[in-house]
Amino acid sequence: MSDQRPGAHQLIASVVDEGSYVSWDEPIDLTALSPDYRAAVDAAAERAGTDESVLTGRASIHGHDVALVVGEFRFLGGSIGRAAAARIVAAIRRATTERLPLVAATSSGGTRMQEGTPAFVTMIDISAAVVAHKAAGLPYLVYLRHPTTGGVFASWGSLGHMTIAEPGALIGFLGPVVYETVNGVPFPEGVQVAENLVDKGIVDAVFPVEGLAEIAARALTLLSTTTERTADPADHPAWPITPFVSRPEPDEGEVARLWEAIETTRREDRPGVRELLRHAADDVIPLNGTGYGESDKGVMLALASFGGRPCVLVGQDRRYQAAQSMGPAALREARRGMRMATELGLPLVTVIDTPGADLSPHAEEGALAGEIARSISDMTALTVPSVSVLLGEGTGGGALALLPARRIIAAGNAWLSPLPPEGASAIVFKDTEHAALLAARQRVGAAQMREDGTVDVIVPEEPAAHEDPEGFTAAIGAAIAAEL
């Protein structure tokens, strides 16, 4: 269906004033890619007529100067790898510097599976650039095209001042093919459709591509008198995008060790956030709910103290999530904690331990993707000290939502992945037998993330957490206190 809709070049040509588009894109360096990945990129470029999954540049729309970020789904499903992310971030920052409104026309399946966790965390850097752009008083308009799913929808695709969508576009947190692959049943029809998202208050309106220029120009006319503000760059620290580095194929020992770590974090007797607070905190006052009539036990909110240092703590409790997956209310409760930390000038500590967010029609219609995006946005904009702890499982956008702290601690067996390894394997290999190998290739493990610069501190598990819960949680608590 997407091949029958305008690609990136066609959309730009149909929307901007004739002859006004100037590309900002630099050539992509492919030298570090493996032969198989290079072949896939070359084939994608020939198919799409673009060198990456996004095009960026400057143009005018009915006389209004704008910066553009336009996705190309025919290039590896519009997936965002590190090169594409770096291109997007550079364009957003340039738009901010040149004080240009930003128009993003997304079309993407999310994170590029060939690059895994290092590509997954770039959604934070893109979101941080958008937050800084908006903080400078500059408009950000989003046009969600068919299809827009995954990490793109759950980050910078859901942060627009105004968000409109292509008629009939598939828009959702988890694409239906991925959902069916992971869960074995199809996703209900009619939920992840642009018109339904308008009905549910998630998207502002639906406009065809032919009407995009007019509605964008009208919005830009109304927003052209926004007051210029100077944002402090220190309030919006950049998330470092790891350059793509050619690495050898993980050996059998590395694959086995990582898979053992993943299975260890899934044990029912592994200590979680409540054990951490019980054994390692000086004092704890639990809080409850969003303040707006919602509560989700998948997230715990509390005032706490570690090593004499008070903080606001937001922690995911995977035991509750085993019975009821973490939904939008859990993230709204987490954002209550972020606001509280800012208002009180207290450090924020987030604890990540989740098998993944709720993948249901109810969650989709409750703006799960938007709440993930806003959580990432709020975390990147914090002006108080912040520490994130990868305590165990770290699956998908639900984990990413609480990750963007100034300092990141990981337990020795902890991991972070855009999808459960079995789900990623089903997509890439059409089976689940390669889950362990793909997890190693995607560099989801704590040691790999430390090497890639995502994690700052690793707390070793010697022995594993479930064998010495008090010792493990005490070590995590000491690391939190030290980082605070």
Image: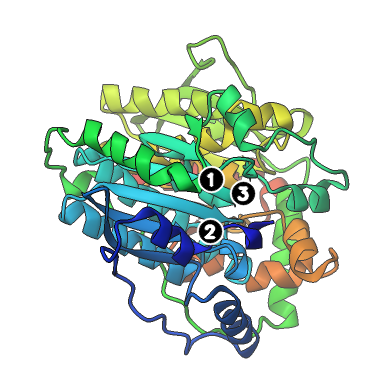
- Sequence-first disc among 2 and 3: 2
Could you tell me the amino acid type at mark 1? Answer: Phe
Quadrant of the image occupied by residue 93: bottom left
Q: Nearer the viewer, residue 448 or 136?
A: 136
Residue at 52% x, 43% y is: 208
Residue holding disc 1:
153
Q: Is residue 395 above or below residue 59?
A: above
Asked if residue 385 lies left or right of residue 154, the reply is left
Count of labels in the image? 3
Residue type at tag 2: Phe
Question: Residue 431 at what x, y percent from top left?
Answer: 85, 65
What residue is shown at x 53% (from left), y 29% (from top)?
A: 202
Lateral position of residue 438 relative to residue 112, left or right? right
Q: Residues within 10 Å of mark 2 (few under 14, many from 20)?
A: many
Tell me the SS state at disc 2: helix
Disc 3: which residue: 396
Residue at x-position 26% and y-position 27% = 345
Between residues 144 and 293, which one lies in front from this camera angle?
A: 144
Q: Quadrant of the C terminus?
A: top left
Classify the position of the N terminus by image quarter.
bottom right
Residue sitting at the far top: 293
Q: Position of residue 324 (x, y in %)?
A: 74, 28
Of circles 2 and 1, which is in front? 1
Pick whichever of labels 2 and 1 is earlier in the sequence: 2
